[in-house]
Image (cartoon, grey):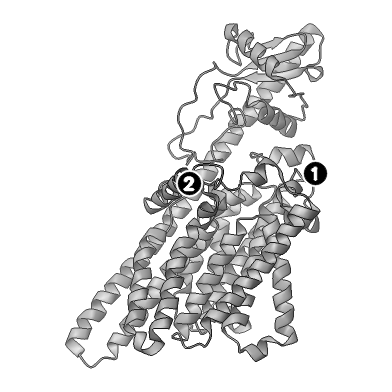
Amino acid sequence: MTEYIKKHYRLILLSVIAALVCFGYQAFNTNIRIDTEELINHPGSTLGWLTIGRFGLVLLKRILGLGVHKAVKSGILMLLFFILGGNVLTYGCYYFSGKKDEKPYWIFTLLYMTSNIWSFQFYFSMQQAEIALAMLLVAVTGFWMCDICFLEEYKENRSAKNLCKTVLSVVFLVIALGTYQALAAYYITVCTMFFLLIFWQVNGKRKKWGLRIVFLAVHFGVAYLIYKMIADIWFMAAGDYMEGQSNWGILPVAECIKNVLRVVKNQLLTVGPRNFSFYVIGILPAFFAIWAVWNKKAEIGRTGFGIFTAGMLFMLITPFLMTIYAGAMLVTRTQLALPVAAAFLAMFGVMTLKERQASVAQSEKAEQDRKVRHKLQMISNAVVLLVIVTAGGQICYNFRMHNADQVRYEQDALLADQIADALKRESSKVDADPVDKKVIFIGYREPQLNGWNRRTEMYGWSFFEWDYTKEHPAGATHRITGFLEAHNGVHLDDGYSLDMENKAAALSEDMPVFPADGAIRMEDDMVIVKLSEITERPAVDWW
């Protein structure tokens, strides 16, 4: 490791710069985001995480001292763990490639560290540090287990050192899965990446590939079973959240398949920032690598060729493992496999092109091979250029999403201040405290964003429109009261009944829209605040 740091300190510096550029503003920003208000208003609470199988998140939160929301501390730790995790993966690429210094490891670092997926995951500042730490644990586990399974002889694997690593890896995986279940796909992708690098580096010359892969799979299976036992038996994780994790058996099979195909289509068409990556371009280098191994099948044998091909095809599938498991179009923050797969395909593509170019240079057919080398060099340069363009696009999307959230927050804060002041004025008129009554917000209020702001999933969505529907016109009330309490320190009772919602909706028909006079109405049992008319919200780009 010391030698690696001395030789490749620029890679470490690149990871730090990329993380600070893409997520530094997000890490040090103290604005209130969706779900964060719950931890601010209920410090020390587990927020129901134990009942949805996330005991690891609660454990890490207590270890890190983040039971009370501390935005800056959480952001600093997130950056630290994220950078460390990224560098473990990059070091793994170096280590499993035979510690060859000339490989394009910078490509993996650049694409992985700037991926838009991390913006969606680290948006939730109340858990960003814990998720980043769990990712680091997964990266270390993948490195240890691939080293034990594929690079050492079995007699050495019985050593106390490797036994300790194996057991500790189980512990790390259980904690990671208990922090965020989608890290299972992340771990599988990391192991697949390391396996392909090892196979390529040793030219397939290993005995008992199948047995080694089975051992790795069994190790993961043991960790997963332990996680399930702790979650289901100890914490009795259940409820709609756990039962709704998979649509298979709930929706018709055809509908589940359609959901999977929609996700595949969106990924291949790079629809929106959630799908913008090098993945689509990387499919071609993947098949070039398969072709290159086919040409070497005399050396590695048909079995070796089959193993490598299966591994590479599986790598192409890894970004869809979660949606295949669920049979649903999952939110982007679960897509943790995509940054690893996309960055690996880019790095491995340039790596195979360079090696092919070098092998052609050693041939005796000078003139013909000179043309081939020239073409390979041009293709390699084109891939590198596309890598830089893709990284630039990812950085740009990150900026646009973060800017949208800042604009959203500033407008939410201004509106919250206006509502808090207006409630005080109205309560003074009738000598009544709105705290003693149910408060119902009818309608919604969208933030005013410009063309630079990117509104997608959580980004650019106001607390004053979250959960609103025409059928449920008071749907945003809980989010609004939570924001008012977190931002203004005003506690309001949002425990209204369905009958009260219907009554408030009917009474609001003759009311003007806030902040006009009369937009707040005091009734005997409730306070009505009208934010808009009850209409269908304009279509927005959620997916």
Give the secondary structure at mark 2.
helix
Q: Residue furthest left?
A: 367
Where in the figure is residue 89, as x and y percent of width and height?
57, 70
In the orientation shown, which residue stands out farthest toward the bottom? 364
Q: Position of residue 197 (x, y in %)?
A: 48, 77
Residue 253's tag is: 2
Q: Residue at x 41, y 73 (%)?
A: 309
Whether residue 114 is visible: no
Q: Which mark is residue 347?
A: none
Percent x, y for residue 326? 55, 50
- Asked whether residue 412 is in view, the answer is yes
Compute the Cα span from label 1 to label 2: 38 Å
Image quadrant holding the N terminus, namely: bottom right
- Disc 1 marks a residue whose amino acid type is Ser
Q: Residues within 10 Å of mark 2 (few under 14, many from 20)?
A: few
Query: Closer to the N terminus: mark 1 or mark 2?
Result: 1
Contact flag, marks 1 and 2 (Cβ < 8 Å): no
Q: Quadrant of residue 358?
A: bottom left
How many C-alpha atoms fall within 10 Å of the one at disc 1: few (<14), some, or many (≥20)? some
Identity of the residue drawn at 52% across and 76% down = 195
Task: From the viewer's perspective, tell me whether residue 56 is left or right of residue 452.
Answer: right
Residue at the spot of label 1: 45
